Every structure is written in C-alpha cells, then in structure tokens.
Amino acid sequence: MGTSMIDMARVARNPRFGVSATAPVAFWGYSEGGFAAGSAAELAASYAPELPVFAAFAGAPAPDLADLARLGDGSLLGGGVGWVVNGFIAAYPQHRDAFLSVFNQLGRSVLRDVNSYCVFDVMRMLPFVPTTFYTKDGRPIRAYLDKEPFRTAVDEQRLGRVAPKMPVLVSQNRGDDVVDPLGTDRMVRSWRAKGADVTVETQHLPLFLPGTFFGHGIGMVGELRALSWLNEKAAALGR
C-alpha cells in the first residue's frame, strides 16, 4: 500500500493535472489509508528518494494486522478479512494454497465475493459474522497468524520497523473499536526510538457500540488538526 501511495504522488506531480512537476509532497490517510500513509512514510527514502516529501499524516493506521484481526473479528466489517487474505495471496502467490487451506466453503466464498466489494458494500459482507464460521476447524483467523505463511505476511506488513525521514503526525482515538490504540502506541515508540520526528494527536472519546466502527469513525475528527498541522509544515517550506 505504501508503494502505491508513493506511485500516486509521482503521477500527480504533472502539469497536465494542474500540479507542478516539482511540487512538494505530503502523505495523508485515515484507517487503512492511514496505514498506507505510514507505510509510504517508511518507504519514501528508499523507494522514491527523488520525491520531496515534507510531511505525512497517519490517522488510526492499523499498524499491526494481528490487532486488526482480533478487534475486527465479528464486527460490522468482519468480512474485510477477505481483503487482507486476498492481499496476502497476491503478494505471496507461492503460498496461495496454504492461505486458502484454512477456509471452508463459506470462507472461500467470502474471499471470492469481496474482490468486487468496497467499504460501502458492508451489508453484503456478512456483517457481525465471526471468522470461526469461515475456517475448517472453527478457530478464528487470528489463531493462524502465528503459523506460516501467515506469520511472515503479518510481520512484513507491520509498521514501525523503519523510521520515516519526514515529520509525521499520528492521530488515534483511545476509544477506537477497530484499531487498537496500543498497537498505534507501539508503532510511535518504535519510530521515535529510531529517531523519527513524530507528533501524536489523541482523542479521548469513549468506546461506544463496539464492533460498529462508531469509535473508529468518530476518530476522524483528528483530521481537523491534521489539516492545520500540514498547512504549518507546508508554510515552513517557504521560510
């Protein structure tokens, strides 16, 4: 996801789109978009050293898929596990059979169906059905994440392993019912320990109707602070 966001930035810097070919770049995203922005921030120096990236905003970035598998299981968007597993299969095609082997007929149908769904199709994705219904042995999908090939796939997607070279703003609601705030805390600590410049904007909104994405969605109020923060960073470029 990080490389995709960087590639979009490369394409966007084009006068055909009304953007200067030398325009400075900032990454922005919330939820899985926050994950993409965080990943892009980690990868920019090595994947796109030519891009003048001056800042990044990662809101509720779901930095660890193991946390997401635990909190998201049986939620409104529980069928989204199909997106993750399909992504694993695309990234590690040599392990396709191993990934699919844990799923029963219902689970495989979910993986197949979600290929044509987006988040607005949530009511077609078996909302609130736990992943125990999808596996052959009735265990939740998180029970497989410490076994190969899932372990490597999850580990290689975890944020916090590389320090971003640009300032980063991280936003997180402590009452998030999908993205574990403790996972976001671990990412921030890891980035800071590696020397990254990280600012944290915290919302202390209460946990309400868990599994409905209410606590996750309301955390988007952090984007208001992110807008002013990015404007400040952009203004500093001209000083």
Image (cartoon, rainbow, N blue to C red):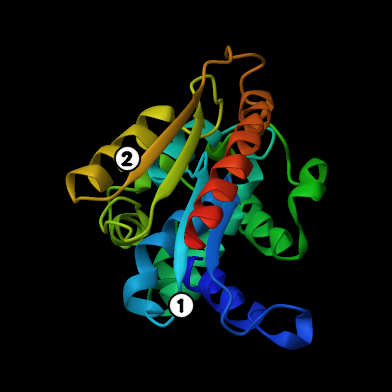
Nearer to the camera, 85 or 118: 118
In this view, 112 is above or below 236: below
Q: Residue furthest front?
A: 239
Identified by mark 1, the residue type is Leu
Q: Secondary structure at mark 1?
A: loop
- Residue 218 in sight in this render: yes
- x and y percent of residue 54 in the render? 45, 62
Mark sitting on residue 215: none
Which corner quadrant of the image does residue 72 belong to? top right
**Left or right of residue 120, residue 142 in this image:** left
Nearer to the camera, 53 or 221: 53
Mark sitting on residue 188: 2
**Residue plotted at (67% across, 16% down):** 209
In this view, 119 is above or below 222: below
Q: Which residue is mark 1?
A: 51
- x and y percent of residue 227 in the render? 63, 44
Which corner quadrant of the image does residue 39 belong to? bottom left
Nearer to the camera, 18 or 237: 237
**Left or right of residue 9, residue 174 in this image:** left
Nearer to the camera, 227 or 222: 227
Q: Nearer the viewer, mark 2 or mark 1?
A: 1
**Left or right of residue 9, residue 17 in this image:** right
Identified by mark 2, the residue type is Val
- Residue 81 in sight in this render: no
Q: Secondary structure at mark 2?
A: helix
In this view, 7 is above or below 63: below
In this view, 65 is above or below 219: below
**Residue plotted at (63% across, 80% down):** 13
**Residue plotted at (55% across, 32% down):** 178
